[in-house]
């Protein structure tokens, strides 16, 4: 199966998610956290996935990595990575892919790093595991990798422990671990959470450098739509487990079609407008994911809804160069 991955590298789409649905068993019942999601990632893409907390972004990322927690499982669909169905691979085969062909940068470096291991050893262990090199060679490669993510004096800092680094520097170590083997796909799940604006910009610059230097495709998951607008060429907007809009960054940010996309953009206005008028919150709350879906999930919060919105769920359909799931937008187009 892994040979199939290697020989399929010349295809444009390196990742294809088709009709993926994921349920989670909880004390509140079965939560339908991802519902019929389909999208693809081409070589060199920088794709943003945005939406409020609980919309299914991180669950989608964990499903691609086959790291879903107990009680969460795909109930339909497929995840194809360079021609191989990730959901059909054995755990041994997935371990060979994680960190090698597919890298992941998690949102909480404190939880991602082992406090009992030096930073250099943690980066080196990733290289050693997949490249089959000696500890001496992996240690030298780890220093080079830490230098590439702009950690000052990397030879010295490689011997230090996570608590000796700032939050921003810890996130750089996590990026070094996730990209040490030059993966074809990098999934960055909220990599700038809890970082100040200056450090956020540095992290984005590092990911951009990885994309440019190695050609790695990046799926950038964030609730920060402003960061996504600066970094990504294509945007996927998720709400209540579904994709409600997908298209180029320029198209979506200049003229959003879905009312939820429009509300997200208005909730993060430019700085001068924010100071003058304040933030524009999205009224209401996301729906209960354990309830049976009737109509559009955003209808209760939408000022543009029509009668059909409360009766059936809109499909994701092409509207020019983008895709939108909205009955009202379909009527207006």
Image: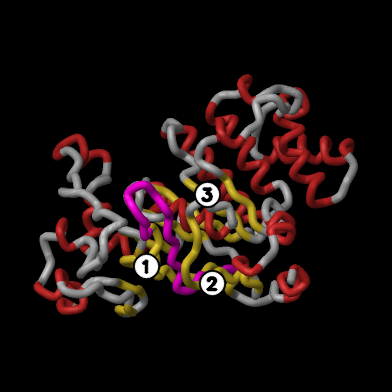
Q: Which residues are magenta?
A: 14-32
Q: Residues within 10 Å of mark 3 (few under 14, many from 20)?
A: few
Image quarter of residue 102 = bottom right
- The N terminus appears in which quarter of the rendering? bottom right
Q: Is residue 126 magenta?
A: no
Tell me the SS state at disc 1: strand
Q: Nearest the camera: 281 or 198? A: 281
Question: How many angstroms separate mark 1 from mark 3 (CA)?
Answer: 28 Å
Nearest to N terminus: mark 3 or mark 2:
3
Q: Residue furthest top?
A: 164
> What's the residue at 31%, 66% (across, down)?
244
Q: Position of residue 172 (x, y in %)?
A: 60, 36
Q: Nearer the viewer, mark 1 or mark 3?
A: 3
- What residue is shown with label 3? 69
Q: Residues within 10 Å of mark 1 (few under 14, many from 20)?
A: many
Q: Nearer the viewer, mark 3 or mark 2?
A: 3
- What residue is shown with label 2? 78
> What's the residue at 54%, 31% (across, down)?
168
- What residue is shown with label 1? 246
Q: Residues within 10 Å of mark 2 (few under 14, many from 20)?
A: many
Q: Position of residue 78 (x, y in %)?
A: 53, 72
Question: How many angstroms separate mark 3 from mark 2 (CA)?
Answer: 18 Å
């Amino acid at each position: 199966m892994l040979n199939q991955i290697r020989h399929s590298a010349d295809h444009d789409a390196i990742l294809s998610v088709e009709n993926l649905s994921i349920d989670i068993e909880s004390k509140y019942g079965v939560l339908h956290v991802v519902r019929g999601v389909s999208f693809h990632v081409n070589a060199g893409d920088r794709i943003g996935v945005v939406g409020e907390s609980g919309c299914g972004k991180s669950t989608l990322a964990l499903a691609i990595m086959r790291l879903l927690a107990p009680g969460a499982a795909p109930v339909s669909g497929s995840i194809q990575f360079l021609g191989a169905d990730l959901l059909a691979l054995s755990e041994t085969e997935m371990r060979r892919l994680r960190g090698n062909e597919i890298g992941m940068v998690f949102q909480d470096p404190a939880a991602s790093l082992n406090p009992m291991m030096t930073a250099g050893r943690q980066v080196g262990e990733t290289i050693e595991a997949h490249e089959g090199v000696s500890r001496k060679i992996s240690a030298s490669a780890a220093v080079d990798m830490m230098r590439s993510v702009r950690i000052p004096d990397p030879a010295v800092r490689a011997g230090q422990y996570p608590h000796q680094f700032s939050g921003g520097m810890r996130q750089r170590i996590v990026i070094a671990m996730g990209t040490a083997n030059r993966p074809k796909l990098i999934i960055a799940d909220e990599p700038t959470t809890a970082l100040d604006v200056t450090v956020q910009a540095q992290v984005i610059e590092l990911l951009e450098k990885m994309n440019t230097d190695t050609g790695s495709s990046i799926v950038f998951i964030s609730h920060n739509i402003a960061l996504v607008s600066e970094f990504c060429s294509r945007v996927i907007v998720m709400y209540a487990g579904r994709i409600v809009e997908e298209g180029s960054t320029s198209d979506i940010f200049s003229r959003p079609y879905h009312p939820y996309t429009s509300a997200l953009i208005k909730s993060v206005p430019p700085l001068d407008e924010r100071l003058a008028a304040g933030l524009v919150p999205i009224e209401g709350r996301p729906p209960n994911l354990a309830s049976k879906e009737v109509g559009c999930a955003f209808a209760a919060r939408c000022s543009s809804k029509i009668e059909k919105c409360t009766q059936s769920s809109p499909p994701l359909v092409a509207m020019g160069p983008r895709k939108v799931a909205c009955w009202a937008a379909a009527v207006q187009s």
